Image: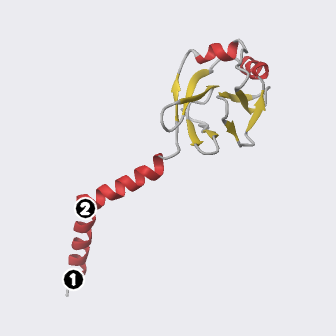
């Protein structure tokens, strides 16, 4: 019969086995990465919003209200958002929302999980999670605000 210390040692040895670690890592990576896109900084995005010239098939969204927004996004044809935090808008309203807030806006490309550009956004918040449902083509953009401190 093994003592408690010996049982613990055997348990820890089995847990450190490389095959188990590899399987656990792959399972975790697959579950965490699947369906998530990203944003990439693109200074040319400001031109699209600044001129309010939109493709007729693009969909515009404002995070907040036109008078007090923290982000504006435009998605390619066929993509949409299903969120109460993002309101549908037109190109002119999106451009006016950016102008109303003053400076501090940065442009980003919105990429799906495969790295394809599916939209663009202007935001004052630089910590954004992108989730894309490939089947329904619904995009979720979650902005994370940092409150207080540096």
Q: Please name the residue shown 79% across and 22% down the image.
A: 93
Query: Quadrant location of residue 27?
Result: bottom left
**Depth order, front residue of 147/77:** 77
The quadrant in which the N terminus is found is bottom left
Quick one: label 2, few (<14), some, or many (20+) residues within 10 Å?
few
Q: Please name the residue shown 72% across and 28% down the image.
A: 60
Q: Position of residue 7 (x, y in %)?
A: 24, 77
Q: Position of residue 92 (x, y in %)?
A: 78, 18
Residue to which mark 1 is pinned: 3
For the residues labelled 1 and 2, say whether their Cβ atoms are less than 8 Å apart.
no
The quadrant in which the C terminus is found is top right
Is residue 121 left or right of 28 when viewed as pictured?
A: right
**Depth order, front residue of 101/54:** 54
Q: Secondary structure at mark 1?
A: loop
Residue to which mark 2 is pinned: 16
Q: Please name the residue shown 48% across and 32% down the image.
A: 115
**Depth order, front residue of 22/56:** 56
Is residue 89 left or right of 131 when viewed as pictured?
A: right
Q: Give the mark nearest the N terminus, 1 or 2.
A: 1
**Depth order, front residue of 46/147:** 46
Q: Secondary structure at mark 2?
A: loop
């Amino acid at each position: 019969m093994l003592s408690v210390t010996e049982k613990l040692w055997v348990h820890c040895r089995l847990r450190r086995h490389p095959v188990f670690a590899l399987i656990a890592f792959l399972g975790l990576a697959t579950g965490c990465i699947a369906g998530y896109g990203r944003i990439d900084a693109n200074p040319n995005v400001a031109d699209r919003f600044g001129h309010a010239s939109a493709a007729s098939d693009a969909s515009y969204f404002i995070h907040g209200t036109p008078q007090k927004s923290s982000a504006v996004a435009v998605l390619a044809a066929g993509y949409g958002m299903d969120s109460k935090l993002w309101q549908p808008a037109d190109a002119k309203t999106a451009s006016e929302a950016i102008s109303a807030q003053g400076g501090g806006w940065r442009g980003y490309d919105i990429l799906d999980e495969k790295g394809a550009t599916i939209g663009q956004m202007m935001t004052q918040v630089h910590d954004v999670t992108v989730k894309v449902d490939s089947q329904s083509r619904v995009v979720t953009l979650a902005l994370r605000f940092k409150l207080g401190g540096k």
